[in-house]
Every structure is written in structure tokens, then in C-alpha cells.
Amino acid sequence: MRTSLLLPLSLLLACNTQPVAPTGGAGAGSVAELMKARGLSEADVNAALKTYTPSGKRDEYYLFASGGHGGNLIVIGVPSMRILKYVGVFTPEPWQGYGHDDQSKAVLKEGQRGGKDLSWGDMHHPALSETAGDYDGQFIFVNDKANPRVAVVSLKDFTTVQMVQSNLIQSEHGSTFVTPNTEYVIEASQYPAPLGGRYADISKFNEEYRGAAIFWKFDRQRGRIDPERSFAMELPPYMQDLADAGKLASDGWAFFNSFDTERAYGGNQEGRPALESGASQSDMDYMHVVNWRKAEQVVNQPGKSVVIAGMRVIPLKTSVAEGLLHFIPEPKSPHGVDVTPDGKEIVVGGKLDTHATVYSFEKIQALINAKKYDGTDPYGVPILNFKESIRGQCEIGLGPLHTQFDNQGYAYTSVFIESKVAKWSLKELKVVDKISTHYNIGHIAAAEGDTVSPDGKYLVAMNKWAIDRFNDVGPLLPQNFQLLDVSGPGQQLLYDMPLPLGEPHYAQMIKADKIKAIDLYSPAGHNSVTGQKDPFAVEGGKERVERRADGVHVFMTAVRSHFTPDTIRVKEGDVVHVHITNVEQAKDATHGFTIGSHNFN
Ligand code: RUQ
């Protein structure tokens, strides 16, 4: 009976009497009958066959999506769009005990700001670790926009292993983006503030408020960020927005866009324009062109950096003197800044402009080397000429945001106001196809679409609204991920996937065979956070209860639901430490442990 499933669709459709394998007691029927009964068109069935993944079959790609205000990372299989895992990052995640046991609490504690526990985060941009500009499947970094932090997730076990934060900045957005060999994880501030968290009245905005870009040094050997070897660059008080690292031709450089070069800071009750209108007065903002490879040398030279909030910072005037920072005008309130796969160009989405603007790295270099400037900004940063820096512009539509790439020379840009994905030829700067999404599209994620070798094939449109796509669940709707097939000349909508939390901002899609997750922790007693054997690990047969100065220590083993010892006798008022080692060596054989009403799990 199974063989009938292997027949091509056309044959099935042509042959109405061809039986379909009964599915678990559901009524049998020909494909044509099923289509009729469910009101499906041939296009629907075509789309369904492109995503349907039979039981036991694996997906071709992993999609790592930010959980937005959920503060967690969502792992999804593509093309089935089945959710595989939530990785607790900024938010406790009880199923995995994350934030409910000591070892994961230690990670959340690393993410304290000003000594305050934070149990949520606004995750925006996951960044898979890269080798030579390609995803290598080892780590993924994520950011918290609201409480500026960066976390490291190991893809050996899909566990958060570290969180870093600096009081240098008070918010961020241009994060996380990695350099091509994951030398650095970039985190740029969004809302300017006096560096280091000191106070200055908002009327001193131009003089005292600043942005900053932090380059967190990643130590791949240890699988951890090394704050001591990290550094930052002071930036003018413009609102730095997204970022991207150069690659191949532009390796060693990073690009940040910005808005509010007007330096408006709100004050609608104090006679000033509201922030949004104040920040949209000028026709141009500034792309920041940063030579991070040189900055990495400069920061180590005596007298060229200052330490603020424990972070080595290159002051603006040093960056100017050393030629580390240049500006190029970019159309009004830009949003995405995305480096092309060959690293030769940078695509900027206009947001309040209808174009995607394509900057040429070669032209930018020529202007920098010739010191050909159009002047400087109020902080002395040299400005390159817009027209002389670009190759051209592609007329995209209303509200171009983010751009991804495929392997056939096409770029894909999300078009916010039109709720569309525009597919356009990078070479010809011409739109070849536009497809409607539903509704208010934000980021898009194409298969390996921001690496040196994109795959094309699939693209997920990450929509911020789902208005009429799903059953009602009250006033607050699910978010919607729409899966598109982009392998043909146009684009085809395959599937709508509701996401019951949000707002998921960005995602990256990696070939599944690049992920080499472990089956189990071996030897038993491995601490997933430190990556080492835990000092409290206990071997089978050595279970015991010890009374120590700081309380009663229970050294317990667990094998599924079998705990040893299974009875603990203590005196009322004792402090009890329970150290549990799962000594089970079968995959996924775990069991929870809790003490009711004590918030452990
Ligand atoms: S974004 S608002 Cu990535 Cu378009 Cu955060």
C-alpha cells in the first residue's frame, strides 16, 4: 500500500481511483477526493508536498529564531516548520531546569545588570559561529536589546553556557553579528547614553551622550567570550542600528547604520518634537564604516584607549586620528545593512526611502585611501561622498528593511509597508518578483542567506502580525513565519507557521548536517555550563549524605525515576544542598526532580 505514495502527484491526480494509504484510521480516499473534501487547489497540494515530512524523516535545515520578548531561542526544522526545541537563554525554562538549578542560575547571574536579576530579554539577532564566512554549526550567539547582553549557546547540547554584559552601554540593537572567523561578536548600542552608566541631563545630549560598539572577543578553544580581550569604540550620539561584518573582500571591516543623526531626543511636553519626527528631519543618516582589524591593534597601543566600566574603549578622537571610523550618508532612517556573499558590496534598506542602496567596498576604500572627504560630522568623523561610494540603487517599494542572498545572484529584501518580499537581481538592480506576506514583515532568513555561500532554496518571512491567518486566540495574535520556496525564478508561499510568542526578530537557517550535537554527557557528572566535570558529581555506589559547615549535602544519583538515596532525613531549619548526577547513559533518559513549593526543578 505504501508504494502508492511514491507515485508522482500528476499520476495520482490523473488517476482518481488510485488509493492513498490510510492514515491512522482517517478515512481513505483518492488525492482528488481529499482535495475536494478539504477545498485544496493543485497549488495547495504542491506546496504541501514541498513541506510534508513523513514520520521519522528529518529536516534539511535548522532555523534558529529569536524568541523576542520570550527571551529564548527557538529551533525549527525546515521545510517541515516543526518546532524542535526552545533553548532558555535570558528567560528561565523549567522543562530543562534552566534557571531552576544552581548551574544554570549561575549563567543567568552573569546576565545581571546593576546587580539586578533579569528574568526576561528582548532577543533580536541570533548569529551562528562562522569559519571563513560560513556557518560552522558550533555555537550561536544571541543578544538582549532591552538589557544589553550577549549570550553564548553551545550547539553541542543546545545549552546557554555564558552571558556577558557591559555597563558601558544601556541598550543595544546592532547585535549579535560575528566576524568571518568568529574572532569577535559585535554588540552596538542603540540609544545613546553617558558611557559607563553615569548621569547627565538629557539636555546635554550632544556633549555627554554617546553610542558605542563593543567587540566581544570569542575564544573558540574555550567556547567562551573573553571580556578581558574585548574592546569597544566610542561613537557619536546617533542611534546606531543594525550591523554586519565584512567578509572576503571586506574582511576586517564592519558596517553599522544609524538613524537620528539629527540627535533628536524627544521632549514632546517640553516644546521639542517627538522622537520619531525629530529623528526624521534630514534626508540622510550615516553608515559607519569601521576598520576593526586596525582597531584591534590600536586598542593595544599605550595611551590609545581608556577603561570605562571595565571595558577598554577607543575614544572617538583616537578613532578619527587613526582612521578607524568613516561615515557615508545613507538614505533617510535606514534599517538593514547587509554585506553581499562576495563581501564586495553592502546593501542598505531605506525604511523611509524606497530603495535598497548598494555600496561598493572598493569605491569606499579608494575614497578612504585618497582621504577624499566631503567634510566631517560635528565630532570630527570624516564623511565620504554618497554618490561616489555606491554602485547604484534598486527601486524596491515602500519600506525596504532587511536583505538576504541566494546562490543565483538574487537578493531578497523585506518590504515593510507593502508586506512583501522583493526578489531582485543584484547585478541588474531590478526587481524580478514580489510576493505578498501577511502582515508587516520584518526580517527574512534565507538558507545560509548571510554567508559567503548562500543556498537559496528556502526563505522564511518573519511577520510581525498574523491578522487573519489562524484561529482566534483573543486580542493578542500569534506571530507568523511564512516559508517560501525561492528555488524557481519567482517565489512560492509554502506554509504558514504560527509562533505563539514574540516578537521573533531574526533567524538564521543552517544546513542540518553541519550540526554535530552530542548524544549524552560523558562521563556522567559533566557540568553543561562549565564544560567540565562538576566538583559535586557523584558516581554510582558513592551516594551519601554529608553534614558540613554550610549545611547538609546530599550526593544523589538518578537513573530515570530512580533516585538514590530516595529518603533524606534532616533537622528542621537545616540548609540542604542536593547534588544530583544523572548516571543514566541512554540518550534522552532523564527525569525531573523537584521539591514542591520551593521553586526548584
Ligand atoms: S530589527 S527592531 Cu532586527 Cu528589523 Cu530589531
Image: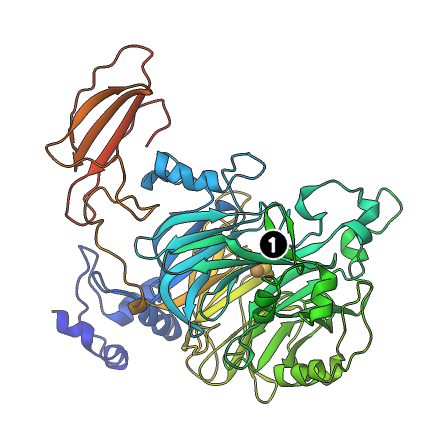
Whether residue 386 can be seen here = yes
Residue 331 screen position, x and y as percent: 73, 72
Toward the front, the furthest residue is 302
Whether residue 18 can be seen here = no
Toward the bottom, the furthest residue is 428
Ligand 1 falls in which quarter? bottom right
| Location of residue 30 by image quarter | bottom left
Q: Which residue is mark 1?
A: 312
Image side of residue 8 versus residue 254, left or right: left
Residue 553 screen position, x and y as percent: 26, 24
Question: Mark 1: which amino acid?
Answer: Arg
Residue 231 screen position, x and y as percent: 58, 57
Which quadrant holds the C terminus? top left
Image side of residue 358 versus residue 545, left or right: right
Q: Residues within 10 Å of mark 1 (few under 14, many from 20)?
A: many
Q: Nearer the viewer, residue 20 or 320?
A: 320
Q: Residue at x 29, y 69 (%)?
A: 513
Image side of residue 553 versus residue 304, left or right: left
Q: Nearer the viewer, residue 208 or 449?
A: 208
Which quadrant holds the N terminus? bottom left
Toward the right, the furthest residue is 271
Q: Nearer the viewer, residue 179 or 430?
A: 179
Image side of residue 558 versus residue 308, left or right: left
Up-down: is 464 above or below 29? above
Q: Nearer the viewer, residue 518 or 425?
A: 518
| Location of residue 91 by image quarter | top left
Q: Residue at x 28, y 62 (%)?
A: 516
Helix, strand or loop status at disc 1: strand
Count up the numbered dots. 1
Residue 204 screen position, x and y as percent: 83, 47
Up-down: is 583 above or below 141? above
